[in-house]
Amino acid sequence: MSIDFPSWADMAPTLVAVAAGRAPADTVVRGGRWVNVHTREVLNNMDIAIAGGRFAYCGPDASHCTGPDTQIIEAEGRYMIPGLCDAHMHIESGMLIPAEFARAVIPHGTTSMFTDPHEIANVLGLDGVRMMHDEALMQPVNIFTQMPSCAPSAPGLETTGQEISPDDVAEAMAWPGIIGLGEMMNFPGVINGDPKMLAEIAATQRAGKTVGGHYASPDLGPAFHAYVAGGPADDHEGTCEADAIARTRQGMRAMMRLGSAWYDVETQITAITEKGLDPRGFILCTDDCHSGTLVEDGHMNRVVRHAIDCGCDPLIALQMATINTATHFGLEREIGSIAPGRRADMILTSDLKTLPIEQVIARGKTVAKDGKCLVDCPHYAWPDTARQTVHLGHALTETDFDIPAPEGANHVTARVIGVVENQAPTKALTADLKVSESRVEMDGAQDICQIALVERHRATGGVVNGFVSGFGYNGRMAMASTVAHDSHHMIVVGTDREMMAAAANRLAEVGGGITIWKDGAELALVKLPIAGLMSDAPAAEVAADAGAMMAAMAACGCTLNNAYMQHSLLALVVIPELRISDLGLVDVTRFELTDLMVDNA
């Protein structure tokens, strides 16, 4: 959605002339199988004519649109499908700036993205959102930006680097690339009629734009109905068939996600494949994909393949990754299908089930072929204010990670965050832990190590300590990350307090990222200098560093699938059950702070 891309209205005279045969097309894709997502059918031996970056003619013979300078692309019987759309995602989760994210996903056939930059909003506020928005507009594919709604995600339970206000939302709604409001994570606020949350929703609705949802609760009773009544138009937090059905029955779009750590398609798609619900109410998305997944496995093509493997009709799966998304955001006449007037975003593939992405056309130009990106993806000039965001206040030592025991206690019952593999929710566990030298100790036999939330925005020097279980770590190790959804302080997890201090100090030294230490040495480092969230290096380089990070986690005993994503979400105080923030331990089932110690018996 570059600012200078011509509108349908501007191009109408040309498109009409080409379709009528009075003017030649720029490009004709000849002899393909047209996958029509409007009618859910495959039309054989069809031609597609393109002019000015838009489709002009779609039919059995485009010879009347062909001139001496028209480029001919021989489809050779391959399927011609619309460019894929990711309906809900966070570019920052790829650890890449928008330009490098685009360069990574273009070869996978993603030509439209609906992004919520709420990660950078928590660090840099409206200025950070504007930087992401401006770089998005520079790209050769469509990157639509949703204005973040919740920074902080849960007021009173965390402290962000910057906050987003209703005035910020109202201002952003006038920006050219803003498509709507990002996921409304503060669902208790909406349910309880919080004026700030409702004001943000109202500003979006007055602008005629879409309100994104985030209802991370299994309660489908009055609270759920109150949330829907507040205005969110979609939700990606469903994890089971009942969630998908409930959302679509209430007029929401059920966004089913397959990200690097979220596997929520298989458990919900039965609402279509077995219950027979109308698939128009369902959309596919990724939510969070890190660079390794993008380089090695794919993007939206991976999600579509997975939906098909789960028993979904390939044409329905494609609808849920194209026209359904476009319609939801009011862009059905712009993207999401191969039809006259739409942006000429198209994929050539030889098989609808395995979906090899053989050629990608965006805005009428070939942007990728056989897995290679063929276009430039320009970078924004990121200022120093975006590159210097890790402020600890002082160098940390192992004593900063001490957990003092109640006076006279020789053991305590402590609350423990329980990691759940492949899911966003955690479990609220308790464990009996020993006390040594007036300090509560970790317990490797119970797979309980320590977690700390280190404040990094205002140099307060604050460190909140707790316990976590499920990673399987052993030996003397620590892992630290400035990617710490959503307030993005610094999460440090480890079995040794000295290693935890070393890891935290290392990230302050390099300006943010992820580091893993074991036995006094650094095993892996992923530098993320922009807001402590993103790198401006190519995806392959970041993916290589991320791969080394994953190997280092395994070397420290971790066997979880995609454990990094689990690590980065331990401070996400809007998803149950137990989390950590700069203010303390958070009971998300009650949305209140809670004590680390249960009792002193």
Image: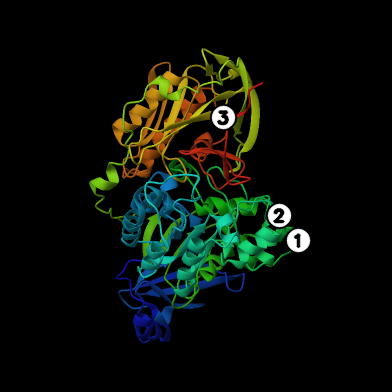
Q: How far apart in space, not on screen, are marks 2 and 1 (Cα)?
A: 9 Å
Instruction: Using a 10 Å C-alpha cutoff, classify the residue at mark 1 as few (fewer than 14 neighbours), some (14 to 19) or many (20 or more).
Output: few
Q: Relative to 398, does residue 595 appear above or below in the rendering? A: below
Say which of 3 and 84 sits in front: 3
Q: SS of the residue at dot 1?
A: loop
Q: Which residue is mark 3?
A: 468
Foreground: disc 2 or disc 3: 3
- Judge from the rendering whether residue 257 lies leftward or rightward of residue 209; answer left or right: right
Dots 2 and 1: beta carbons under 8 Å?
Answer: yes
> Which image quadrant: the N terminus?
bottom left
Instruction: Using a 10 Å C-alpha cutoff, classify the residue at mark 2 as few (fewer than 14 neighbours), some (14 to 19) or many (20 or more).
Output: some
Q: How far apart in space, not on screen, are marks 3 and 1 (Cα)?
A: 39 Å
Q: Earlier in the sequence, mark 2 or mark 1?
A: 2
Amino acid bearing label 2: Glu
Residue 418 in percent (x, y) is at: 61, 33
Amino acid bearing label 1: Lys
Instruction: Using a 10 Å C-alpha cutoff, classify the residue at mark 3 as few (fewer than 14 neighbours), some (14 to 19) or many (20 or more).
Output: many
Query: Residue at coordinates 61% horizontally, 30% vertically from top-left?
Result: 415
Amino acid bearing label 3: Val
Q: Earlier in the sequence, mark 3 or mark 1?
A: 1
Say which of 215 and 556 sits in front: 215
Q: Which residue is mark 2?
A: 241
Q: Relative to 15, does residue 305 appear above or below in the rendering? A: above
Residue 318 in percent (x, y) is at: 57, 62
Q: How is colour applied across the structure in the image? A: rainbow
Query: Residue at coordinates 34% horizontally, 28% vertically from top-left?
Result: 506
Q: Earlier in the sequence, mark 2 or mark 3?
A: 2
Query: Residue at coordinates 48% horizontally, 66% vertically from top-left?
Result: 199
> Which image quadrant: the C terminus?
top right
Q: Which residue is mark 1?
A: 275
- Quarter where residue 111 is shown: bottom left
